[in-house]
Image (cartoon, helix red, strand yellow):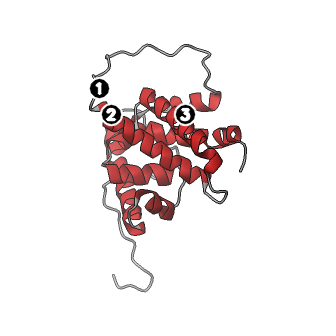
């Protein structure tokens, strides 16, 4: 097993991405810290053949769900939070991830839990649909369907966001097919018209 500090360097951004997709920035930082504290405690007893990234994503998801559950039991935060002091312990890679709290992350957070988990674990954490199925206890087909439905919902939401005159969320050069718009079927070769 590699030293734990290398594990934090290698997988810290992925874990933060998962936490930020499920939580607001302040809670995501706390969940990230809790994830690595729990991982550090369990690290000496971890089997050597474990997929470390998948294991950390599972821990992060559970810590984020703990925060979501606890949110209902605590008072609501004030409207404006103080800005963190410049030069804090976060690195440039984490600052870049933190700067991406935009319409996409808000849209991901608004997805139903099954779709949100599938999209975050597959598309943000980079896990295969089989790994997502193992982590969530759902079938492979259900995870694939949830991921596809989640992406379709994100396209609808972000497409509506674009039509209201906001900054486009599609990358430059992407196809200009609006989400939900019917696609023209091209006839197959040899088919009668």
* Image vertical order of residue 123 relative to residue 16, above or below: below
Q: Nearer the viewer, residue 6 or 159?
A: 6
Residue 154: % across, % down: 36, 47
Examine the image and state in which quarter residue 15 appears. Answer: top right
* Image vertical order of residue 147 relative to residue 43, above or below: below
Mark 1: secondary structure: loop
Is residue 179 at all visible to an observer of this figure? no
Mark 3 or mark 2, which is nearer the start of the sequence?
2
* Image vertical order of residue 130 relative to residue 2, above or below: below
Q: Are marks 1 and 3 in contact (CB under 8 Å)?
A: no
Is residue 21 at all visible to an observer of this figure? yes
Q: CA distance from mark 1 to mark 3?
A: 27 Å
Q: Are marks 1 and 2 in contact (CB under 8 Å)?
A: yes
- Residue placed under numbered mark 2 in the picture: 70
Residue ID at (54%, 13%): 85
Residue ID at (50%, 61%): 131
- Residue placed under numbered mark 1 in the picture: 74
Mark 3: secondary structure: helix
Q: Nearer the viewer, residue 185 or 70?
A: 70
How many marks overall? 3
């Amino acid at each position: 097993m590699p030293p734990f500090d290398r594990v934090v360097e290698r997988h810290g951004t992925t874990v933060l991405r998962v936490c930020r997709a499920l939580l607001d920035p302040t809670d995501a930082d706390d969940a990230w810290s809790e994830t690595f504290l729990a991982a550090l405690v369990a690290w000496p007893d971890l089997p050597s053949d474990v997929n470390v990234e998948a294991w950390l994503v599972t821990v992060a998801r559970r810590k984020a769900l703990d925060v979501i559950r606890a949110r209902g039991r605590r008072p609501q935060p004030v409207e404006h939070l103080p800005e963190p002091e410049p030069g804090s312990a976060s690195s440039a890679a984490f600052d870049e991830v933190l700067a991406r709290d935009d319409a996409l992350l808000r849209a991901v957070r608004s997805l139903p839990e099954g779709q949100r988990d599938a999209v975050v674990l597959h598309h943000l954490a980079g896990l295969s649909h089989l790994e997502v199925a193992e982590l969530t206890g759902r079938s492979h087909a259900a995870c694939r369907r949830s991921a596809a439905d989640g992406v379709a919902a994100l396209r609808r939401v972000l497409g509506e966001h674009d039509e209201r005159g906001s900054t486009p969320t599609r990358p430059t050069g992407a196809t200009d097919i609006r989400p939900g718009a019917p696609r023209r079927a091209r006839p197959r070769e040899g088919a009668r018209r």
